[in-house]
Image (spheres, rainbow, N blue to C red):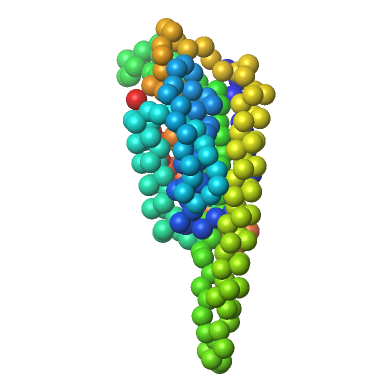
Amino acid sequence: MNCEVCQLKELVLEPLEIREVLRCVLHTIVFHRALGLVRPKDVDCELFEITYVHCGDAELDKKIEEKIDQFMIWVEKHPNRKCQVSLSFYEVKNKQPTWFSNRIERLYWEQWYINLHVVTPKTHGKSHHSKVPVNSEEDELKESSSRRAALEDSLREVLFHIIKFVNDKKDHIPPIPNNEVTSFTWIALQFIRFIIWMAHRCVEENATDFTSQYA
């Protein structure tokens, strides 16, 4: 089976923006790759002037929130890191059982990589050698607003990239089995992989591997 891979543009963001960004990106991907009937629901971002659509499935929402929670816990322990969140879709095939186990094969047909650079917010204060503030409140607000606007623009680019990819890449998508209405029980996998950048070297943390099937 052909597996298509999509690498999304890196987003530079602060910890408080992670949840909103991941919700937006993950739900957009899952909605456009839902095989079968869904109940579309528009969601307005709290931090950005962006509206995205999700499938209106409470159990799927719960699973995505659980994965984001896991990622947030990791970020708290590893600040100022570049990391990668991967969302994969697969088809389950039962292989010939052996004496030791009933083997199930996962045939991956699509993988998405969401690249994030999480940075710690800058703290502004007074210099140790002067009573004059290092940055005025006005400059601080201007800098924060400019950075947030840049992130919003980048997030829009990512969403456009997702839509273009799902429209261009369709031949590899497997048929819906047994004419089922929904496909989440057999294709959706939230698999999060973290890439740490240290001293200009990329080290993959295999121990921090969260994998679950939506069922």
The answer to whether any part of residue 178 appears in the image is yes
Residue drawn where x is 56% and y is 18% of the image: 173
- Give 45 or 15, whichever is nearer the viewer: 45
Q: Quadrant of the N terminus?
A: top right
Residue farthest toward the top in the current orientation of the protein: 178
Q: Which residue appears at 38% of the width and 47% of the height?
A: 69
Left or right: residue 82 versus residue 103 is right
Q: Position of residue 80 (x, y in %)?
A: 52, 61
| Residue 196, horizontal then vertical, whole percent | 53, 53
| Left or right of 9 on screen, residue 38 | left
- At a point 67% along the width and 24% down the height, the residue shown is 168
Residue 92 visible in the picture: no
Q: Position of residue 36 (x, y in %)?
A: 46, 16
At a point 51% along the width and 80% down the height, the residue shown is 125
Taking depth in this image into account, of 77 and 61 the one nearest to the observer is: 61
Q: Position of residue 97 (x, y in %)?
A: 36, 13
Q: Is residue 198 left or right of residue 157?
A: left
- Quadrant for the C terminus, please: top left
Q: How many marks?
A: 0
* Location of residue 63 with respect to 143 vertically, above or below: above
